[in-house]
Image: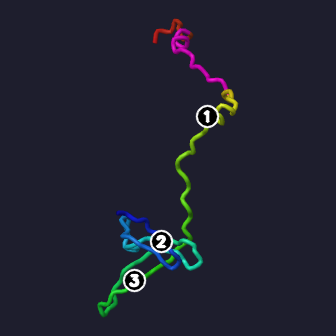
């Protein structure tokens, strides 16, 4: 059974950064909800002291923007039919045949 995970104020989650290509990139990336309810990005970098103790550097980043809808919304047929069709902005130019250009260069010069 799968349950959806809902962030609450003061909670967050981070996962391994599979896009890490440089040493200074964070090992873990995720999101955290601040007490005021805003979602922020979070970066976590593990470290080790000279004595061998483990510690984590945590950076709370900029507010996370909601995702934009990438799929266009379906247009109702009535709305589609209500829109007027526009004529093309300019007529399409037709290329001239190359045979006319060669025929005009026909003269008595041997080369």
Query: For the magenta stretch, what is the residue range?
Result: 90-103
| Residue behind mark 1 | 77
Calculate the distance from the C-alpha at mark 3 to the C-alpha at mark 2: 16 Å
Q: Earlier in the sequence, mark 1 or mark 3?
A: 3
How crowded pointer 3 is (Cα within 10 Å; few <14, some 14-19, many 20+) is rated as few
Query: Is 104 in front, or is 110?
Result: 104
| Residue behind mark 3 | 56
Task: In the rendered view, tell whether residue 21 sits above or below residue 83.
Answer: below
Residue 76, picture quadrant: top right
Q: Earlier in the sequence, mark 1 or mark 2?
A: 2
Task: Count up the numbered dots.
Answer: 3
Calculate the distance from the C-alpha at mark 1 to the C-alpha at mark 2: 41 Å
Task: In the rendered view, tell whether residue 67 sits above or below residue 34.
Answer: above
Q: Earlier in the sequence, mark 3 or mark 2?
A: 2
Examine the structure image and report whether residue 102 is included in the region drawn in magenta.
yes
Q: Quadrant of the N terminus?
A: bottom left
């Amino acid at each position: 059974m799968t349950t959806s995970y809902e962030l609450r104020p003061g909670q967050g989650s981070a996962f391994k950064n599979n896009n890490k290509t440089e040493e200074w990139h964070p090992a873990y990336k995720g999101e955290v909800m601040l007490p005021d309810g805003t979602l922020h990005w979070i970066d976590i970098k593990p470290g080790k002291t000279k004595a061998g103790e483990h510690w984590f550097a945590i950076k709370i980043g900029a507010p996370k923007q909601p995702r934009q809808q990438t799929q266009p919304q379906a247009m109702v047929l009535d709305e589609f039919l209500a829109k007027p069709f526009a004529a093309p902005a300019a007529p399409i130019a037709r290329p001239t045949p190359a045979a006319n250009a060669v025929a005009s260069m026909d003269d008595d010069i041997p080369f």
